[in-house]
Amino acid sequence: MGPLAHIALLLAAAALAGALNAVAGGGSFLTLPALVFTGVPPVAANATGTVALLPGYMAGAWGFRRDMEAPPGLSILAVVAISLIGGSAGAALLLFTPDATFNKVVPWLLLAATAMFAFGPQIRRWTGATGHGTASPWKAGLGMLLVAGYGGYFNGGLGILLLALFGLLGQTRLNAMNGLKNLVSALLTTIAAAIYAAGGIVQWKQALLMMVAATAGGYGGAVLARHIPANVMRWGIVLTGLTMTALFFWRQ
């Protein structure tokens, strides 16, 4: 495969990933394999793909701006602050992670996130979290911190994990969850990109190329998602998570 084919692959993967992130999350599971296939080492591919998707997250958040609201137990300001703290810690950890360890951990994290989202309503009933305002601020904050750390470490599946967390906290409007998911993803990606860049693991030529396609895909996906029935979107998210989990187990 020649250079032009590599460029076409990266552009296509970024556009689809931007749309997928706006709707369901998991876009990095398209950009990561594409970058690895074109010769970028796994850890560097994760960092590069994360940076490339940043404009897509911003476009997706803008597309959902009218629907966005904080989950029970947290304010928007608290979500922003916790996201930046957790994202910084996770991104710093990635700089010291060997490629072999990274490849082994990823599919298990995504599998857990998909299961949490799929069974979120049942878990809320089992734990008694059956409405708005039921999550205590410290529990909501701890959950947000853990997810933010995950997002700074590995962007893949972050959207699914965020949707699972918001559901467990008692948020029920899927478009509101999607809007906040894109905002948090943009914040995490911004701080992570700065740390990845400082660590010298970003392949900027590929990242800049993919940013353009991811931006168009992110905004288009957000507009489309507002017209998809919530139940269809929910099970589409679950299917996306299971498919990408299987692909990463297969790669091991």
Image (spheres, rainbow, N blue to C red):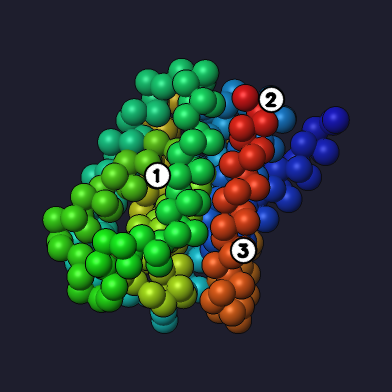
**In which quadrant of the rendered view does residue 206 lie?**
top right
Q: Residue 102 appears at what percent x and percent y?
A: 48, 26
Residue indicated by mark 1: 151
Q: Is residue 251 visible to the viewer in this orientation of the structure?
A: yes
Secondary structure beneath dot 1 equals helix
Is residue 80 found left or right of 207 in the rendered image?
Answer: left
Is residue 232 found left or right of 172 in the rendered image?
Answer: right
Q: Residue 30 appears at what percent x and percent y?
A: 65, 45
Q: Earlier in the sequence, mark 1 or mark 2?
A: 2
Q: Outermost residue toward the right?
A: 1
Is residue 230 found left or right of 33 in the rendered image?
Answer: left
The residue at the point 26 percent across, 51 percent down is: 143
Frontmost residue, 211 versus 242: 242
Residue 246 drawn above or below residue 59: above
User: Distance between the Cα atoms at labels 1 and 2?
Assistant: 24 Å
The residue at the point 57 percent across, 57 percent down is: 238
Residue indicated by mark 2: 39
Q: Earlier in the sequence, mark 1 or mark 3?
A: 1
Q: Earlier in the sequence, mark 2 or mark 3?
A: 2
Number of the front mark, 1 or 2: 1
Sort mark 3 into few (<14), some (14-19) or many (20+) by Cα contacts within 10 Å. Answer: some
Return the mark for residue 236: 3
